Image: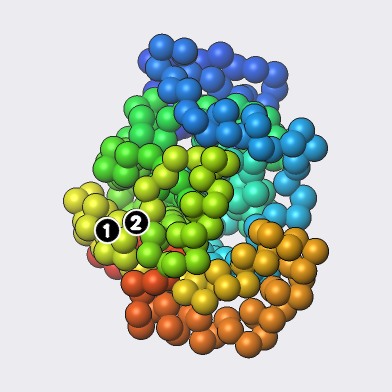
Amino acid sequence: MTKHFLLSDVIRSKAKYVVRNDNFIDVLQKTHNVLYTQDRFYDIYIPPETYPGLTIWDDSFWKNANEAITHALGNIKGKLILDLGSGIGEDTQYLLKKGARVVSLDSSEKCLLFSQRANKNLHIRADATDLSFFKAKSFDIVFGREVLHHVDTDKCLMEVQRILKNKGFAVFQESLKYNLLIAVYRILKKKERVPQHPFSPNELSCIAKKYFRNLETKFLYTLLPMLYIIKVFIPQKTKKASSLYNTFFSKIDLSLSNKVPFFAWEEIITMSNKSTVHLL
């Protein structure tokens, strides 16, 4: 599918855009664009040399999450996917390599420019809670990693439901709020972090049920924060900490998190209105 066909396929003709270069970074008119805190955050904290090379898909700390996401997505070859809150394009890069047709959407133009260096798909700058410029029933899949807890979740999921095809589905990885070590980490890094509202274990499902009939959830990482803190504060020990986690704690952590999800750090949730969903 060409870039021009992607535009006519998913975007309403009434939307007005400024198209830059041949890579289609589309910027909504200023009157419709919200200057998110994320924009200022990325301008300050992401250095210019940041580039999708080694990505979250190569980070062994996130092995369990990536496996759950891969299973939930299934075979995505040829599927039209919206990477919602695409950031610097790590997930976009993975989805493209798996043969999907991808539209990357983020509120930060700077992040989209980073993504564009590695990914030559359609990039759009917009608010994740207002996707009105997309035609209804346009996408096979909507995927988002750590986006819903930064936005008005109700508004966002209402839009996601509208733009998904009848047999389409959405997969999100989202942060939860009751893990004690992560709560301390959020306090310590408060000045550096984007405003957010992490979910309780049942909160996201309760919101999603307003818009989707079928939900599947998987909880992760009750124990991981013990070693992930090493990655944050002693980065030179990251490889050793990661190896320790995957060798001794990973399987126990996965089982514990799903049996007692209250202190889990992350949730993978699949949402669908079709008769069955791809079980995690």
Q: Which x, y percent locates residue 129?
A: 36, 34
Which color scheme did the rendering employ for the protein?
rainbow
Q: Which x, y percent locates residue 37?
A: 49, 30
**213 up-or-down from 252: above or below:** above
Q: Which x, y percent locates residue 161?
A: 30, 45
Give the Cα distance between marks 2 and 1: 6 Å
* Residue at x 56% of width, y 14% of height: 18
Q: Which x, y percent locates residue 16?
A: 45, 13
* Residue at x 66% of width, y 37% of height: 45
Amino acid tagged 1: Glu
Q: Of helix, strand and loop, which one carries label 2?
A: loop
Amino acid tagged 2: Phe
Q: Of helix, strand and loop, which one carries label 1?
A: helix
Question: Residue 275 versus residue 241: which sits nearer the camera?
Answer: 241
Residue 120, image quadrant: top right
Give the quadrant of the C terminus: bottom left
Residue 42, image quadrant: top right
**198 up-or-down from 253: above or below:** above
Question: Residue 70 versus residue 137: which sits nearer the camera?
Answer: 70
**151 up-or-down from 273: above or below:** above
Q: Which numbered marker is on residue 199?
A: 2
Q: Mark 1 points at which residue?
A: 203
* Residue at x 74% of width, y 67% of height: 238
**Left or right: where does residue 34 sit relative to residue 189?**
left
* Residue at x 35% of width, y 80% of height: 260
